[in-house]
Image (spheres, rainbow, N blue to C red):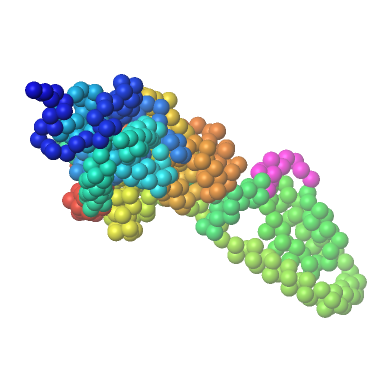
Amino acid sequence: MHQSSFDNADVGTSDVLPSALAELPSARFVWSLRLICAAALGISVYLAWTAFGMGQVFGCSGGDLIDCEHVLTSHWSKVLGVPVSVPAAGLYASLIALLAFARQGGPNRLRQLVWGGITLGSTMAGLAALWFIGLQVSELKFCPYCLVVHTCGIVLTGTMLASGLCPSPLKLKSACISLLGIAALVGIQVVTPKADHFEVVHYDDVVPAASTNQDDGIDVFEAPGEAFDAPNAGEAAEKSDPAGAVSPAAEESARAQDLRPVDEPSSVATTVLFILPPQFLQLTHLLLLTLPQCDDEAAKSTDAANVEVTKESSELPNEASVKKTDGDNADAAATSEASTPEANQSDATVKSAIELPAPVVSAPPERRLLTFANSRFTLDITQWPLLGKTDAKYVFVEMFDYTCPHCRNTHHAISGAQKRYGDDLAIFALPVPLEGACNPAAGGGHPGACEMAKIAVAVWRLDPSKFQTFHDWMFAGSRTVSTARAYAETLVDKERLKAELKSDMPKQYISRHVKLYQRVGSGQVPKLIFTKTTVQGEVNSIETLCNKIKSELSVAQK
């Protein structure tokens, strides 16, 4: 009696497997699938590790198109709060486990389960790859590591669907189940609100830190320099000030008057007095009063001339004096009729010169001191980069890095709070680059952060009204140093920006920002520093931020 082998027993089923499934696949084919799954698994584990450790992906950040941090910290990089690289790693690990049985003989049902499971997992990986590649295209940001994993999924899907190792009905069932699974993933991501990833730091009561400047007994963390150089100071000095600022031309004229020698000869106007009729003496004397006198010698010369002319007039005989007077009166009358407009104009000029008010020097902006982090530092609102108005009711400090994706996400919440509160909200916007070149407390990474921060400070100093526009644009996407400077040149004068960046002032501001960053404990950014506490980490919810503002700054800061 012939006894069938175990391979042909068809245990648990009456179906007969296709000839392709009855034959074992080649070792090369199976090992190819294993290598593809192993590559995808290794990258998925690495991305999951960086996500949980909030670390930086090696060699992939800060570009206009290639920016792994932007992709891996976006809302779409998680499902139910878990990085999508975690379920991806689980999926590829399961495929490797199934491939361990791909060349082993056994019951037909078992072999169906093995290849059906491989087809199902491969199809699900391929559909997920299409979804996430589409998201990267829509965001115009790409992660090469992610693209390698997605490519592995697409290759596995195409290979399994084209092979005859799985029956066609089973392929169709696998595709339908995979489609439903990815649809569930997409739905969960769409309806899940953006999660916040921050912690609130509470400070103990401490004695305020010492400062190099004092203001009525308050330790004030001053801006760079012994005296604060207000933004746009150079441009303001070149313009005429309605409040009474002296123009450069007037200063040059006054300087020339001051440098005139004391023994300078009398002016031409004094000499003319000897030949003019006496009737013009009064007008001439009035004009001389309006002219600047550099020394007493000129005044004495004028008085001597007046006395000499009067003396000569009094020594004339009576008849001659009468005739001369009559002739002079006639001449004076004729001259008066001919030159009345000029005389009136001269009188108006003299009157205008006499009534001109003295120049008044405009007062510096009034200081407004605000204390943060439970008295760890005090800032003057007129001295630092500010988003909003100096008289705003609610004010807090934001420390950030333009290359930080968490800062970029938090900026959306801050923008929403600004729209809600309007002019009642202002933010000290202090860039703190996470680059070792200008921030020893930050370590390495984030190339270009220092230069972008200096460009932002330069824009604020040259034109504070354009700072908000530049700040919002920087956080609208991932920027580079070249694109940041090019955009800054569209907001402020190119040559003035070049001169400002060559100066040491932007660098000094960044250095002061870093000192404040160290004073509140360094560590993670963004930092939103309020009167008593600090929120550090990513804040995505506008409502959460507004509630924090209300609780911390419910009483107007004065």
Look at the image and say whether residue 262 sits in the magenta stretch: yes
Compared across the picture, whether 508 is left or right of 103 comes to right
Q: Total label count?
A: 0
Residue drawn where x is 52% and y is 45% of the image: 487
* Residue 201 falls in image quadrant: top left
Residue drawn where x is 68% and y is 48% of the image: 253
Compared to 450, does 216 lie above or below? Answer: below
Residue 181 placed where, x, y %? 22, 46
* Residue 273 falls in image quadrant: bottom right
466 or 233, which lies in front? 466
Look at the image and say whether residue 177 sits in the magenta stretch: no
Let me know if residue 206 appears in the view.
no
Residue 128 placed where, x, y %? 30, 42
Residue 9 placed where, x, y %? 12, 29
531 or 202, which lies in front? 202
Residue drawn where x is 19% and y is 39% of the image: 200
Residue 185 placed where, x, y %? 24, 46
Tell me where the magenta segment starts and ends, as one range.
253-265
Q: Considering the image in quadrants, where does the N terminus appear?
A: top left
Compared across the picture, whether 302 is left or right of 212 comes to right
259 or 302, which lies in front? 259
Residue drawn where x is 73% and y is 40% of the image: 261
289 or 350, which lies in front? 350
Residue at the farthest top position: 27
* Residue 126 falls in image quadrant: top left
